Image: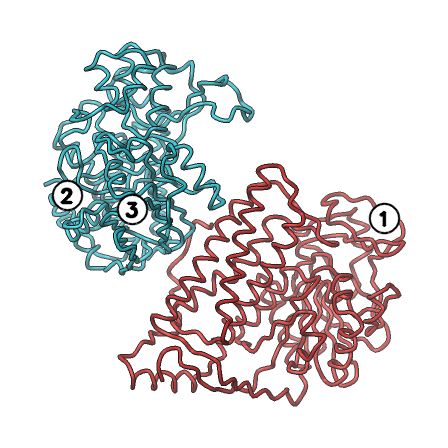
Amino acid sequence: MKENEPCNRSDDKGHPRIGIYIGRGTSHSWLWFVEVFDRIGFFDLAFLTETELRGDGLDRCDVLAMSGGDTFAIAKGLGPEGADKLARFIANGGLYIGSCAGAYLPLHSSKEHLNLFNFVPAKIANLTRTLPEARRLREKFCTAYGCAYIFHPVREAVRLTTNGFAPFKKAPSLDAPLYGGPPLIAGGSAQVLATYSGFTEKTVFLVDKKLASDTLLGKAAVIRQKMGQGYLHLYGPHFEHPRFTVANQLLTDAMLYDLRPDPVQIHETIASEEIICGEACRNLLKNIKREISNARIVAVGLETLPVQWTIGNKLYETAKIREFIEPVWRRIKRLEKLNRMRLLPGQAGRLLQVASETTALLREVKRDLKSGIDTLYKAKDLFERLNRTSALFLEIYFRTKRMGDSRIKEFRDGQQRLSSGFLPDHQGRVCLRRCRYRSP
Amino acid sequence: MENLASNKISIVDLATRNIIEEELDDDLVLEKIGGAGITKSLYDRFADEDPIVLGAGLLTGSLVPGSSLGVITAKSPLTGRVSHVPLSLDAGMELKYSGFDYIVIKGAADKPVYLWIHDGIADLNDAGDLWGKDVWAATDHIRDLMGDDLIQVLGIGEAGEKGSDLAQICINYWQSGDRMAFGNLFGKKRLKLIAIRGMGLLEIAEPEEFIEKCAGLLSAVKSGGAAGIRGIAAMAAAVGEEDLGGWLQPLTHKHMACFNTSVPTNTFVFLDEDPALLKETAVAEPGFLLTDISPLLKLKKLGLTASDACRVLKACATYGIDGASVAELSEKAGLTDPEAIKSSFPSLKGPVSSSGDAVFSPWAAIGNQEKDAWMRRQAVAYIFGIHPIFAQLAPELTEEKLLDISSIGTELELTSETLEEVIADITG
């Protein structure tokens, strides 16, 4: 086998195939799911847009992770076809994990678009017709919901108590961050896995403390609902937030607990797939790194400017830009250590093209902001491109990580026969005595 | 070299536009330590190709007090000697975090280019749009193009482009310690500027001990003789030069330190705005950052007002010519009118005494130091990456302590014998 020569392979089995929704309405928080799944070694991830989800994207998945974002936009983006696909996916044994906006989505609702997803007969406790006074962060405090409002009593870490039932046995209490997710009132056969039980030093109160307590405490934070052969796990707080490792563990434990007994069988044998290594890999990574570095530099510069954009129902600060870039940046270094990449024809070109356009747009936004020009439309375009750049890169990254050990050995043997051997130690060594400082 | 380094050397061939990378070998660090020790070694290796070598000191960008210094090593068109020029302000630190430890630039381009250094990527780009711009306009242009105002720009102006043997590489908008006409070398190589952004990370072998030692050094420096010195005028007085305080005070807006240097050695003067203004000025270019004592002293001696002297130095910076040389040649020509001095820039030629006769730029040679001791102190500063003026003001930063902290940070056995050899090598 020579460098760049295509090869066939089928993936290792035993791990769930997880779809992560990255389409219309999602925020950057889908990248938190990516972080958690990457950490625990679930590399079989598929990044699904609304078009892919409406198509056959879910047919190849055991799990769908729906992150935070704008629930209305997600519902509208998926539409009746998406709702139907999702319902069938769950009924046929799929697992739906919804966090924050992803938790609101399948709750019963009479509102247009949302009423397509009436899967779980639970109510929310933060719905009001009389909006309370906002004590801070007025811009993130509420969302209109027809004639009423959904208000968010607190933000940041809250305390939760688990009920001791499987699959939430490991931790009696834990903290997880709340960024607009629902306090739930379970109905029907829904099982409550955790309730809101208190606040933490990090909790930021957006309303009066008593009202926050009345609204949240004792309400369900996580519920589990059976639907047909499958399950829905709905998380008000972001259990997938990478800084909350206990919550991460419970989320993945619960996922494994409710996986369908017979995972989907994927034979991902693509004749034209390429594995590149050595000089070719280094050059491609350098080109990717160049674009991402250029984007990252502008993004850091933008963070000094006091600007926010309201896109749909969500508020975007300039700091959100790096939420998309940093996960890519960190993984470039890991691929450099691996010194090999596995990708489909044209993937690298598309990634470089979108990354380059993203950098150009970032620079335009920066220039326009300095000149006092309105940047809302460019910002919308920018976040879409950032989303696309991250997804394209991560698709390559996880495709590479999915190369099983037997495949790596076969690949390495082939290389050693035909060349002087290129693969360095692909296990990134960790030295606990070292530290890093000067954050960017 | 894994600790206190990016482990990468870039070798840029301007003639072929080929850029290759090498690892920074532990052996090279064990033999030459860092900073000027290694830039000199790299210069010698590529000497046939008239190289310009940039690098950071072993401790540059770290928590060691005064660790702001980078270095440029090349053969001075003025003296014909291989010399070392300081990179102060934030330029040395940004270079350290740029993903490269050292950059060798050899050959000459056939048309104007600029080098963009970021995150371990070195890109050589056409500088057609930049050539012909003064230093300030070029800095604005590149920062706008790349979208970041924190980019450090080592660039030349008209002086460098037109081959003046007094041309200076400026740092962003300001005068640098380049008294060796390295700006002339940039011009000959058609290298308009080097833009650097450093967002990398450094690893430390023994972080707790390293940070503890750094904190101890900082405490010692803060209670030492350098404490309380603020600004360029106070610094001149502290080293026995003429006290510029009363002369400069009416223009003084604020003092600024180079990266992690506890003595602010630079002073920002307002020339077109009230210096006492506390809120942000609406004036686009309110004044100038004074980074070099020598030309100030000389222009004062010529009888210029502080305002006129600062305006002359601002013109030097935009034109990209060494202010100390301009002041010296103006004195020789009997020029005392600021406008006449500015008009003389295109016709000024060396040699000048302000380039000194040593291997280090005399930028930091203020006061009345004993020559050998001063030479040694400069060498130590340029090897470890310590601001050379600060190194003079802070004797608490002893060679032993710098060696000790370097060994802790790198896990390499760096000895005083090696340091002696490196000092001898770069000062010989």
Q: Chain of mark 3?
A: B
Q: Nearer the viewer, residue B61 or A435?
A: B61
Q: Residues within 10 Å of mark 1 (few under 14, many from 20)?
A: some
Q: Which corner quadrant of the image does residue A312 belong to? A: bottom right
Q: Position of residue A142 (x, y in %)?
A: 78, 51
Question: Element type at marker 1?
Answer: loop
Q: Nearer the viewer, residue A219 or A275?
A: A275
Residue where numbered disc 2 is placed? B426
Q: Chain of mark 1?
A: A
Tell me the colour chain B is drawn in: cyan
Residue where numbered disc 1 is placed? A131
Point out the image quarter for the C terminus of chain B.
top left
Q: How is the image coloured?
A: by chain
Distance from disc 3 to disc 2, alpha carbons, whole Å, reads 15 Å
* CB contact under 8 Å: marks 1 and 3: no
Q: Is residue A217 above or below residue B336?
A: below
Q: Nearer the viewer, residue B339 or B33?
A: B339
Q: Which corner quadrant of the image does residue A213 belong to? A: bottom right
Q: Residue at x 24, y 57 (%)?
A: B412
For badge 2, the amino acid type reads Ile
For badge 3, the amino acid type reads Ala
Residue where numbered disc 3 is placed? B56
Distance from disc 1 to disc 2, alpha carbons, whole Å, reads 73 Å
